[in-house]
Amino acid sequence: MRLVFAGTPDVAVPSLDALSSSSHDVVAVVTRPDARAGRGRSVVASPVKERALELGLEVLTPSRPGDPEFQARLRELAPEACPMVAYGALIPSSTLTIPTHGWINLHFSLLPAWRGAAPVQHAIMAGDEVTGATTFLVERGLDTGPTFGLMTEAIKPEDTSGDLLWRLARAGAGLLVATLDALEAGELHAVAQPAEGVSLAPKINVEDARICWGTPALAVDRHIRGCMPAPGAWTTFRGDRLKIHPVTLAPDAPDAPDGPVINGDEVITPQVLAVGEVAATKRAVRVGTASGVVLLGAVQPQGKKPMEAADWARGVRIEPGEKFADE
């Protein structure tokens, strides 16, 4: 099929590569306009644009997908389908109808679960054991269109959203190609999503990523992994923001691994700490939650690079009874 691919971040690149290597003809790529990023706030192209230029493809960067100029060029390109992955803008009805087979989205959840911008993050934070990816026909509603196919993926206990998203991005690329293959062959028809099992996954902003130490240890662990790498889970210590990387459940926390936790040459034994209370030894930093203790891994003070929690604790010299703030 003749395709125009739409996508923006790095997780969309595997799908672009897979489609470019398939029997389909990718004639152009649609992506978000260049934007300022990084500490220097320099203007940079999206990862999809960079890859498309390497592949020698035409790149379209409309400020809005409903722009008349963009719609006119899309009609000239005459795509049979517009596959999309994490494009980052809503497609208006007047643009949806241009390709013969419509816009076909690869979404990183098992729809109708986790409709929205952050399905992987919400799946981890909710404690889901299985997630996946779904291809569906885009319509005006938020991820509500009829589905074509799906794949499943187990969520590992140590997964961060970044880990899981990359696995889904790579495996989902194959699902997207297979969906287009079947559509071209006339072997696939969209099926309406069930009315039951709907959940929403809105974008997680920086304020949402703040850790609430007053929740159970397992919830703290999931929250931190769900926010890793972006926007990054954080707390405050002595009034300054501190990013917290994935933690380990201590032996006294529910759902902790059986047996002692060993950190370096130090055996971590159960310890009672108040909610948010921080206690440090030579090699370990513990924090109290509503149901037990977690052991910090790496932390990142504001304006600095990540470091081991024990190194951070030696530098700040934690006093007995000091706490992380969670509000």
Image (spheres, rainbow, N blue to C red):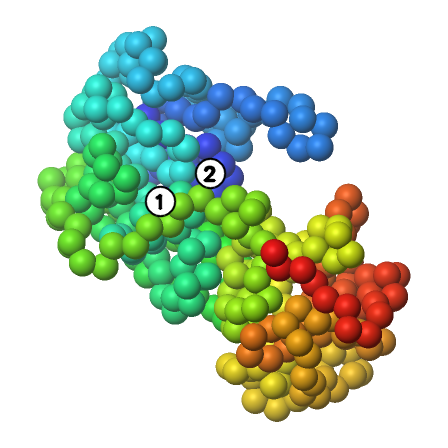
Judge whether 274 appears above or below 112 on screen. below
Residue 71, labelled with which disc?
Answer: none
The residue at which mark 2 appears reads as 13
- Looking at numbered disc 1 in the image, what kind of residue is underneath it? Gly
Residue 184, given in percent of the width and then of the height, sits at 17, 36
Point out the image quarter for the C terminus. Answer: bottom right
Q: Is label 2 or label 1 in front?
A: 1
Mark 2 crowdedness (10 Å alpha carbons): few <14, some 14-19, many ≥20: many
**Residue at x 67%, y 87% (from the top left corner):** 270
Give residue 199's quadrant in the image. Answer: bottom left
Spot occupied by residue 152 in the image (x, y as percentages of width and height): 32, 61
Q: Residue type at mark 2: give it.
A: Val
**Position of residue 210 measured from the top left corner of the image (x, y, whole percent):** 58, 54
What residue is shown at x 46% (from left), y 32% (from top)?
8
In this view, which residue lies farthest toward the bottom? Answer: 259
Circle 1: element type: loop
In this rendering, the answer to whether 147 lies above or below 24 is below
Q: The N terminus lies in which quarter of the figure?
A: top left
The image shows a total of numbered marks equal to: 2
Q: Look at the image and tell me whether residue 162 can be seen.
A: no
- Residue 272 vs residue 171, the one in the foreground: 272
Q: Name the secondary structure under disc 2.
A: helix
Q: In which quarter of the image is residue 127?
A: bottom left
Say whether residue 326 is left or right of residue 280: left
Task: State how far apart marks 2 and 1 are (Cα).
Answer: 20 Å
- Image: 120 above or below 18: below
Q: Residue at position x 83%, y 67% from top?
A: 318
Q: Name the residue under label 1.
A: 116
Give the residue at x 40% y 59%: 123
**Depth order, front residue of 63/44:** 63
